[in-house]
């Protein structure tokens, strides 16, 4: 196995790596459980059925598993430090031109080093014969669509194993369909847990893995925050972001009844209430930097205690093929949207709308004609096909 993008965290302390033992079997075991649920586990119709089967294969807190995950050897090469970029006194570092900096804002803000790419390790997994298809499928899906450490859904800790990779970019679709048939997968079914879907888009292949990662992340950055798509042109200071074209800022201004004199909420017919970007994962931190009387820094999360956090259903990462080409890959997990939202624990008259046709109809909407029902995920996948990296669907 080879690490092909920097790994964020992975140690016993959240966000930190361990130079003595950067790749831990317990971390891999957790990833394999997730990808088993997302693939072979999708044949289970209820969570009770899923947990019973998962317990048989992977064990539980009460019963040890017969499936053993070991790291036979690993090489520590070096750390990678992404310095927080603040080109002016305003500190709008998230709006610089580097897509990877957009992904790693939490690492740079907390001054965490990352494990550099090119680290190699040898993985061994022992299992009962009855569980062979389950274990091998989980490993295949984890290596090609997941990763190790934190921020894996944004491409950190992406992996490469030559034996499990497609031969070349051109045969990705055939390779993917062969694996679906081999592992007898039912993809895209709606379950109580996230499952792998057929909605996979691949961009043009490049030589360098980190360039492919950047090309996978850039469309998301532009869709959410890019000038002319996610926000207006900035003014007054270099790198100062313009006003957002998404509904969330004005929704918060209305809900909290406070705003900067220059940023009064737009009329409701020009900017509806709602939180379409919650579909990309929770929590979301909202911060109005340098704007007097605008809402305070706030965290939007799920309403239910066991659903405050929601991992993004969109996975952005590079995929390396056997012929040493690197493809920017965007994968969609089938998952449910939150049923309610709260803002930093406040009881507010918030609108819980995450999908709403009104998000498609207001002027300069990033969703616009890309999704007539106002679904930000659907609009993003339509936007991918417009991007310069020639993203195309690979799942039939």
Image (tube, rainbow, N blue to C red):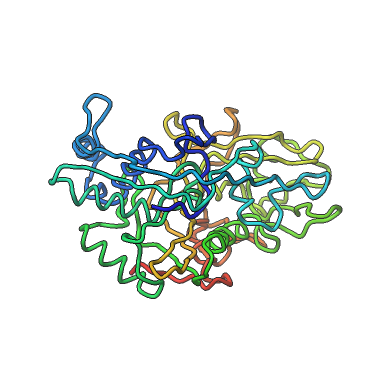
Task: Where is residue 287? Give x, y as percent.
Answer: 69, 40
Residue 322, located in which quarter of the rendered image? Answer: bottom left
Count of numbered badges drawn on the protein: 0
Work out which residue is located at the far top of the displayed protein and give it. 62
Task: Tell me the residue at 32%/46% (across/down).
Answer: 123
Comparing 360 with 316, the one in front is 316
211 sits to left or right of 173: right
Is residue 188 in view? yes
Work out which residue is located at the far right of the displayed protein and give it. 236
Task: Tell me the residue at 49%/43% (across/down).
Answer: 76
Residue 358, located in which quarter of the rendered image? Answer: bottom right
Q: Is residue 325 shown above or below 99?
A: below
Work out which residue is located at the far bottom of the displayed protein and give it. 170
Residue 28, located in which quarter of the rendered image? Answer: top left
296 sits to left or right of 80: right
Task: Where is residue 303? Give x, y as percent.
Answer: 48, 33
Task: Where is residue 108? Give x, y as percent.
Answer: 65, 42
213 sits to left or right of 292: left
Q: Is residue 394 shown above or below 28?
A: below
Task: Tell me the residue at 51%/62% (across/down).
Answer: 209
Q: Quadrant of the C terminus?
A: bottom left
Task: Where is residue 134? Give x, y as percent.
Answer: 22, 48
Is residue 360 in view? no
Comparing 74 with 156, the one in front is 74
Q: Is residue 263 shown above or below 30?
A: below
């Amino acid at each position: 196995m080879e690490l092909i993008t920097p790994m964020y965290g992975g140690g016993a302390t959240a966000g930190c790596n361990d130079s003595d033992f950067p790749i831990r079997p317990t971390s891999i075991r957790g990833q394999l459980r997730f990808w088993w649920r997302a693939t072979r586990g999708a044949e289970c119709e209820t969570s009770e059925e899923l947990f019973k089967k998962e317990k048989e294969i992977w064990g539980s807190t009460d019963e040890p598993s017969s499936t053993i995950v070991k790291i036979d050897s690993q090489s520590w090469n070096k750390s990678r430090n992404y310095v927080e970029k603040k080109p002016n006194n305003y500190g709008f570092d998230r709006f610089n031109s580097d897509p990877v900096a957009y992904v790693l804002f939490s690492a740079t803000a907390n001054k965490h080093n990352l494990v550099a790419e090119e680290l190699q390790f040898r993985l061994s997994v022992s299992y009962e014969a009855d569980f062979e298809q389950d274990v091998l499928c989980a490993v295949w899906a984890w290596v090609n669509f997941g990763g190790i450490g934190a921020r894996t859904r944004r491409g950190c800790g992406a992996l490469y194993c030559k034996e499990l990779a497609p031969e070349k970019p051109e045969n990705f679709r055939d390779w993917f369909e062969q694996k679906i048939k081999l592992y007898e997968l039912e993809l895209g079914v709606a379950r109580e847990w996230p499952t792998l879907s057929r909605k996979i888009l691949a961009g043009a292949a490049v030589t360098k893995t980190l360039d492919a990662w950047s090309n996978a992340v850039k469309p998301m950055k532009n869709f959410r925050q890019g000038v002319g798509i996610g926000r207006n042109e900035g003014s007054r200071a270099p790198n100062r972001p313009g006003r957002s074209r998404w509904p969330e800022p004005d929704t918060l201004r209305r809900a909290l009844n406070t705003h900067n004199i220059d940023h009064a909420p737009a009329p409701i017919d020009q900017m509806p209430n709602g939180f379409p970007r919650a579909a990309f994962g929770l929590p979301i931190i909202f911060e109005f930097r340098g704007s007097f009387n605008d809402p305070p820094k706030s965290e939007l999360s799920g309403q239910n205690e066991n659903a405050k956090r929601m991992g993004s259903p969109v996975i952005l990462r590079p995929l390396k093929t056997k012929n040493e080409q690197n493809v920017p890959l965007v994968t969609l997990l089938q998952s449910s949207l939150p049923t309610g939202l709260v803002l930093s624990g406040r009881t507010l008259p918030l609108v819980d709308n995450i999908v709403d046709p009104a998000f498609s109809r207001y002027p300069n909407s990033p969703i616009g004609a890309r999704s007539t029902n106002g679904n930000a995920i659907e609009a993003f996948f339509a936007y991918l096909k417009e991007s310069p990296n020639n993203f195309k669907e690979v799942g039939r």
